[in-house]
Amino acid sequence: MLEMRAITKRFPGVLANDRVDFDLRAGEVHTLLGENGAGKSTLMKILYGLYQPDEGEILLNGSPVEIHSPTDAIDLNVGMIHQHFMMVESLTVAENVALGLPSNRGFRTDLDAVSERITELGTRYGLKIDPSATVWQLSVGQKQRVEIIKALFRDANLLILDEPTAVLTPQEVDQLFKTLRQMTEDGRGLIFISHKLHEVLALSDRITVLRQGRITGQVPVEGATRESLARMMVGREVKLAPDKPAVEPGRPRLRIESLTVLGDRGDEAVRSLNLEVRAGEILSIAGVSGNGQREMAETIGGLRQPTSGAIFIDDTDVAGKTPAEIRAAGLSYVPEGRMKNGCIGAFTVSENLLLVDHQKAPYVKWGLFDFGVIKEHSAQLVKQYAVKTPTLDTTARSLSGGNIQKLILAREISGTPKVLVASQPTRGVDIGAAEYIHKRLVEQRTEDTAILVISEDLDEVFALADRIAVIYEGQIMGMVDPATTSREEIGLMMAGVHPETTSDRP
Amino acid sequence: MSDFFTTAILVATAASGVRLAVPLLFASLGETFGQRSGVLNLGVDGIMLLGAFGGYYAVLQTGSVWLGLLIGIVVGMLLGLVSALISVTLRAEQGISGIGIYLFGLGMSDLLFQKLVGTPLPITKFPKLNFPVLSDIPVIGELLFQHSVVVYLAFLAVPVSMYIINKTTFGMNIRAVGENPEAADSLGVSVNRIRYATVIIGGTLAGVAGAALAIDLGIFQQNLTNAQGFIAIALVYFGAWRPVGVMLGSLLYGFVNAIVLQLKTLAIIPPDLSDFAAMAPAIITILALVVVARRFKAPAALTKPYSRGE
Amino acid sequence: MKKNRLTWLIVVLALVLVAAACSDDSGTTTTAGDSDTTTTAGDTPTTTTAGDAETTTTAASAEPFKIAIVAPSAQNDLAFTQSIVDAVNVIKDEMGNVEVQITDNTFIVEDAASAIRAYAVDGVDLVIAHGSQYGGSLQEIAPDFPDTAFAWGTAADTFGLSNVFAYEAASDEGGYVMGAMAAALSESNTIGIVGPVEVGDAKLYVDGFKAGAEAQNPDANVLVNYTGSFSDVALASEAAQAFAANGADVMTGTAQMVVGAVTVASDVNIIWFGTQANQTSLAPDIVVASQVYHWEVVLRDIIAKIEAGTPGGEQFKIDLANGGEVIEYNDAFALPADVKQLGEDTIAGIIDGSIKTGS
Ligand SMILES: Nc1ncnc2c1ncn2[C@@H]1O[C@H](COP(=O)(O)OP(=O)(O)O)[C@@H](O)[C@H]1O
Ligand SMILES: [Mg+2]
C-alpha cells in the first residue's frame, strides 16, 4: 500500500535520511529498527507531512502523493503515534480525539457523539478509556490508548507507531500488541519503530534496519535473531549479553535494613525495604519506574534523607550521611540523571574525571593541582574506557550520551569501590556503548565489588543480573534467579502480583 | 464616612466603576483569546490608542458614534493583523514586538491627532439607553438600565466569549494550540491560522475598547488610554484566562478606582494622601492577582512561537 | 517558504520605516518655513522649527534670536505646554527676527535633558525648560554652557546659577478671582475642583480657587479631587461625575487631563472655569471664563536681560498686576453683570493688595 522511494532529508550538518527505500503492505507490521539518531523518526515525519523530503517520492496505493502537512496525511488515511505523546493535557480525552476534525454540528462541538465512538472503538480493540477524563489525569498506558484511538477515529489505514513501547510496562506492551494485531487483521498496515529487539521479533512481519540515515538491511522476521539485528544496527558483531565468568559471591557488602524514604510529594516512596548485595555479584532491581527505585538509589548515594532504617557498607552505617562521607566509606554511584547529578556539563572531560578525587594526592600537591599527573590519569581512563572525545579539554556536554556515561563509569569504577550503585546505566545509550558498559560492570565483579544495578530495561536486567529483585510500591516483591525465571513472571511481579500466587516452582 | 453610604452616592460610585471597567473588559477579553492560543500581545495599549483616535475622528467628522465604533473595529482588525504577522509568521519575541506595536500606536495616534485635529474638540458621546419602566426603577434602574450602549455590549461579550472558547470547535482549537501546538498541528489544526484569528480578535476588541473610551469620554488627547491596555493584560492573568475572571478583574479595578475617587471627593481621603490612594487600584489588583492567579496555570505555550522544527 | 519570509520582512521593514519617519528623535531638527506647520508625535519627543525667514524684513545678514522650548505635553494641549508656545509665538511676532524650535512631549525627563543639551550645543540663545521636573537636569547642564541663557519654569529657584532664569505664575490669583465668581454663580453651593497631583502650579491654582469661593460664600462646599494623574482623562471624567453626584453645579480643574471633566460638565450643564489656556472652544455653552497665562510678559524681561548681557540669575512671576495673567471671559456665556463686576473688583483688589489670595 505504501512505497517510499529514495527519500533523502538533510538537516544542517546531518544527513538524516540518505536515499531510503521503504514499503508497507496491507495487513503487515513492518518494523523500522535503528539506534537513536539513525533517522527513523525523520523518515516517518516525512511520511506524515511534518517534514518535506529533499529528494525522493512517496506512492500510496500505487499513485504518487505529495504530503505537505498532517492534514494531507490524515486525508490519505495515514496516522501517526509520535515518540512523545501528542496530546493537550488540559483537554479531555474526547476533546483530544475530536481536535482538528469537523463537527457534525457545524461550529459547535459534538463531544457526546465523539465520546460514543470512542467507547465503541475501545470495546472493539480493547482500548478501554473514559472519554470525559482530562488527559493529565491518565497514566502513560492510558495515554497511549488515546493516541491509538485518535488514529483509529480518523480511519487510519496506515499507522505509524514511533517507539510506542518506550514508556510501557511489559503487561501494557502485551495489551498494545494484541490491539495492534487486531488492527492488522482488519487489513491495516503498521509501521513499528523500536530499538527493543525482543519486541521487534515478537511483533514484526518484516524488519528494515537503518543506520546513520541509510538502510543496512531488510529481512523477514523468520530467521532474524537479536544478534543478527544488532549487527545490522551497529555495523559489527555485538555481544548483547556479556560473557559472565562465574564468580563465587562472597560476604554481603551492602545491607539495607527496613529503609523508609519519603518521595518528592511527601508520600512513602520506599517502605521498610530490606536488601543485601554480596561481594562479586550483580543484583538487579527490576521495576516499573516510580516504584521507589530512584528514591532508594538517591538515599544510598546520600542525595536524599531516609526517615528510618539503616544502610551498611561493609560494617559502616551510612544512612543519612553526606555523599562525601558515603563515598569515603566505599561507595561509587552512577546516578540516573547523568547530566543532572552525574557530571558537570560545562566542565572538561578531565575535570569531570577528577570531580570525586579532586582533594586528594596525587592530584593535589601542597594545595595545588598537579596538572601533569591529572592529565596522565585522565588520558589513561579515557583510553581504557573508550570514551570518544576529541580532546581531554572538550566540555562534557558536547559528548554523546553513551560517551558521557562511559566517562562517569570510568570515574566511578576506577577507585575500586566496595559497593557500586548504577541507576539506568545504559538508558539512551547506543548499543555499542551499552555493550561496553555491561562488559565493564561484569568485570567489576572480580574485584569483589558488590554491584547494584537499577534498570527498567528487562533485557539489561537479564543480561547482567546474578540475582533479580523486583520492586513494587517501595518494597521488594521477590528475589529470583534469572536463569530459571521468565520475563512474564517478572512482568507480573512488576505489576504487583506476588510470585507465590503465580509460580508453581518450589 | 456616612456621606459615602448614601444610596445616591453608592449607586453613582457603582455606575462609575462599571464605566471605568468597560474599556478594560473589551481589551482584556480580546487579549484572553490571543493568550489562550499562546500569543501574548503587549501592544494592546497601542491598538487601543489608534482605535480611540480612529473612532474619535470618525465621530468628529460625521457625528455618528456607530461609524466611530466601526472605525475602531477596522483599525483594531488591521493592527491585530500586523501583530499576528509579527508574532506568528515572523515568530518575533513577543515581549519585545508588542512594545513596538504599543510605541507605534502611541506615536501614530498622537501624530494623526495633531495633524488632523490639533486642539481637542468635543464629540457626540454614545447615547444612554433608556428602557421603558426598567430605567425608572429606583436604584436598580440607575445601576443597571441607564448606561450607554457600549456598556451592555461589553458585558454581552463575556458570555459570547465563554461560549466560543468552551463550546465551539474553534474554541477547542484555540485551547489546544495554546497548550500544545505540536499536538494540534499533528491533528491537522493549523496553528498559525488559529493564532492569526485570535490575535485579530484581540486587536479588534482592543480597537473597540479604544473607540469606546474615546466616544464615551467625548474627547481625544495624547495617550488617552493612559496605559489601560497594560492593565488589561494584567487582568487576563488575574482572570486566569477565563472570560468571567477577566470580567471580575475589570470590575474590581473599575470599582476600586471609583470608590477611591469618591472617597477623595468627599474628603474622606484627605488631599495629602490622595497620591497614595491613586495607587490603590493597581496595588489591590496586583494583590488579588497574586492570590487568585497562583492557583491557575497559564497556557503552556504562551509566548512560544511555533514552528514544525524543520 | 523562503520567499514568503522575505515578503513579510519587507512589509515589516516598511512599517518600521513609517513609524520611524513619524517620530523623529529629539536630536534632529526639522525646519519649516511656515510657522503654522507643526509636527508632533507622542512617543518620542518631536522637534519643530518655525524659521519664518522670508517674512523677516531686517537685514538677511542679522543673526536671528534663537529660542528653544522643551515641554512635557503636546504643544496644543489647551493647557500647560500650549501656554509657553503661544507666548513664544507672540514674542516672535513682536521681535520679527526670531527662530523658534520646539521639542514637546518630553514627559520622560531624560529625553528633555538630552534635548536641552542639544539646543545648548546648537548655540540657541534662550533654552526654555518648561516643566518643574526639569530642574535637576538644568542644574547639571547649565554650568557647561555659560554663554547660553536658560529659563526654567514653573519654578522659583535659579540654583544660584548666573545663566538660569526662573519663572512662575501666581496661578492662585486667577484661581481666587474665578473661585469668587463660582461661589456667586453656584445655586447648590457645591463646587468641584479636579487636580492632577498636589504640587506646584496645580496646587496654587486649586488652593486659590477654593479660597476665593470660600471668601465669597463661607458656606460653600468646595470639593477637591486630585486624581493622581496628569494624563488620565477617564479618571478626570469620573471625578467630574462624582462631583455631579454630590450636587456640584460649578466646576474647574487644572492640567491637561481635565478635558475629560469638561465634556462631562458640558453633558450635565454644569458651568466651568478654565485655566492655563482659554478652554471656551471645548464647551462653548458652559465655560464662563479662563485664566490665561501670558508668559510673554516675563519672556520680554528675560530677553531684554539677555540682550543686556545678563544671561540669568533672576526670578520672574506672572500675575494679574503685570498682565501675565488675564481672565478671559466667554462672550457666549450669559454672565450676570453683578458677577462680572465681582470678578473685576476682585482683580482690582488683588492688584492693589487689598485682597490676599491666601498663599
Ligand atoms: N528538526 C531537526 N533539525 C535538525 N536535526 C534534526 C532534526 N530532527 C532530527 N535531526 C537529526 O537527524 C538525525 C536523525 O534523527 P531522528 O530521525 O530523530 O532519529 P531516530 O528517530 O532514529 O532516533 C539525528 O542526527 C538528529 O539529530
Ligand atoms: Mg526517534
Image (cartoon, coloured by chain):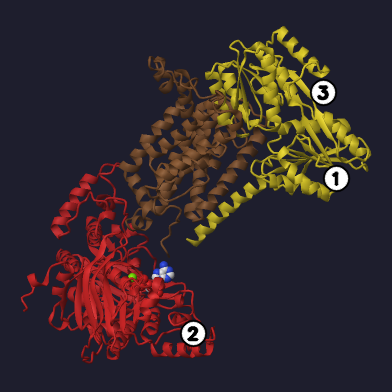
Chain colours: A red, B brown, C yellow
Q: Quadrant of ligand 2?
A: bottom left
Q: Chain of mark 1?
A: C
One can see residue B167 in this view: yes
Identify the image quadrant of the C terminus of chain B. Answer: bottom left
Tell me the residue that label 2 is attached to: A392
Tell me the residue that label 1 is attached to: C148
On the image, the x and y values in percent for residue A164 come to 26, 67
- Looking at marks 1 and 3 on the same chain, the residue that comes earlier in the sequence is marked by 1
Residue A297 marker: none
Alpha-carbon neighbours of circle 1 within 10 Å: few (<14), some, or many (≥20)?
Answer: many
Residue C323 marker: 3
State left or right for residue A163 relative to residue C100.
left
Q: Chain of mark 3?
A: C
- Disc 3 marks a residue whose amino acid type is Gly
- Disc 2 marks a residue whose amino acid type is Leu
Q: Secondary structure at mark 3?
A: loop
Picture layout, residue A358 above or below residue B64: below
Which residue is found at the position 46% from the left and 19% from the top?
B6
